[in-house]
Amino acid sequence: MTMTKRELMLSAINREESGIPSWTMAFFNIGTARRLLGTENVMTDYEATGEYKTGRADDTNRALNVRYAEAVDNCAIAVGRGGNFAFGHGGPGEFMERIVERGDDYLISEYETGVKRLMKWDPHFYHNYDHPLKTLEGVAEYALPDADDPARYEGVEGDAAYYRSRGYMPYANLNGIFSGLHYFLYPYDLLFEAMLLDKESLKTLIIKLAAFNLTAAENLLKRGAEMITTCDDLCDGRSLLFSPELYREYFAAYHAELAALCHSYGAYLHLHSHGNINKLLPSLIEAGIDIINPFDPFEIGPLNEIKERFGDKIIITGGMDKFFFEFNRAAMYEFLKFTIETGGKGGGFILMDSGGIPETVFNETYDYYRDISRELRYARRAR
């Protein structure tokens, strides 16, 4: 009997060697997805509008989310309106966005917290500015949106049931805890300064964001999400953005509480962090995180070494080189063959791109990647 995509995902999580699921993190933009997949296979509710997006996907986009998952060979689909295009972003578990200004080559949007984002197209560039907090003085009085508002999650349980009935694992995106601070609340440079010089005020802000996230996560888990996904880039390509000691001081307790909450519902916690997270992996594993991506070998080292050190402790997701789509076809094939064979040994592996499908990828190149990925992964499934 053929496994559903949800069953294939669970087999990887349970470290069974019955096949390797794949997960497309995103495309660089919605236009690239439409060009590579066909407009008929891409959701229409991802891009921001003039209003905040709450609640469920409409019937059209529920069906399009399934078509998109089929087109990219994903095993999971995100619940909520606008939540299924980019891993970790969109839907009711993240602060919501609306457009406030649009020009020929730029867009300005505003999030629920009041922070604004400037997005430019050529060259591609974005920048968050006008954060609601310019200083941490008085942070104890600062209030976040109501994460318990029922309107935020209206109909989401129907999304979860629909995707599960189609054989997919329903998941939900959630604000990061580190990224959530500098994306939505407090400027990036001042955040690092506060980590050393204003610890108690920063911890007060972290507690507030953690409370929002945990409340949102529980609302989503109650409504049928079987996985919580969250983005928290904790490193750059060389090393950590802060020490393991500072991670444990500020963020480990939250990750542990979020993991425990997921597990209490029989669900999983899936963390995204780019960069060389080798020094942080023991602490992330100790916190109870189930799945981590993207394990880009260009940043973190060879997949076989990561698999040997951590393969029995974490579900390794990713394994793709950030420059993969610049390889020639012979190199693409050999790289994918090595990655799938290495990652698949002993189960516990999900194939994922390193950071989204670039807008420079030709249709023929993407089709070749998608075809050989399926061929190599499904060959293991048939053994």
Image: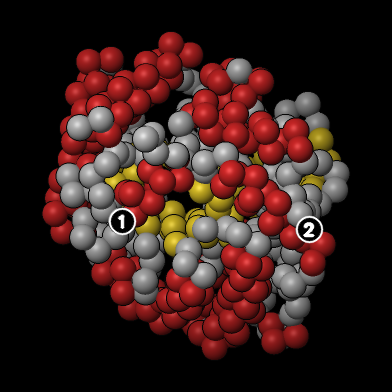
Q: Earlier in the sequence, mark 1 or mark 2?
A: 1
In the orientation shown, which residue stands out farthest toward the front? 1
Q: Is residue 162 visible?
A: yes
Residue marked by disc 2: 154
Provide residue 176's location: percent of width, then percent of height.
54, 62
Residue 221 versus residue 367 in the image, above or below: below
Residue type, label 2: Glu
User: At x 76% / y 78%, what residue is drawn?
Assistant: 143
Q: How is the image coloured?
A: secondary structure
Residue 312 versus residue 47 in the image, above or below: below
Residue type, label 1: Asn
User: At x 63% / y 36%, what residue is drawn?
Assistant: 65
User: At x 49% / y 74%, what residue is drawn?
Assistant: 264
Provide residue 48's location: percent of width, then percent of height.
75, 42
- Left or right: 168 in relation to 246: right
Tell me how many marks there are: 2
Residue 14 - label: 1
Q: Residues within 10 Å of mark 2 (few under 14, many from 20)?
A: some
- Left or right: 249 in relation to 383: right
Q: Nearer the viewer, residue 73 or 131?
A: 73
Instruction: Identify the image quadrant of residue 273.
Output: bottom left
Q: Nearer the viewer, residue 71 or 325?
A: 71
Q: Element type at marker 2?
A: loop
Asked if marks 1 and 2 touch (Cβ < 8 Å), the reply is no
Q: Nearer the viewer, residue 307 or 139?
A: 307
- Which tag is nearer the camera, tag 1 or tag 2? 1
Q: Is residue 122 visible?
A: no
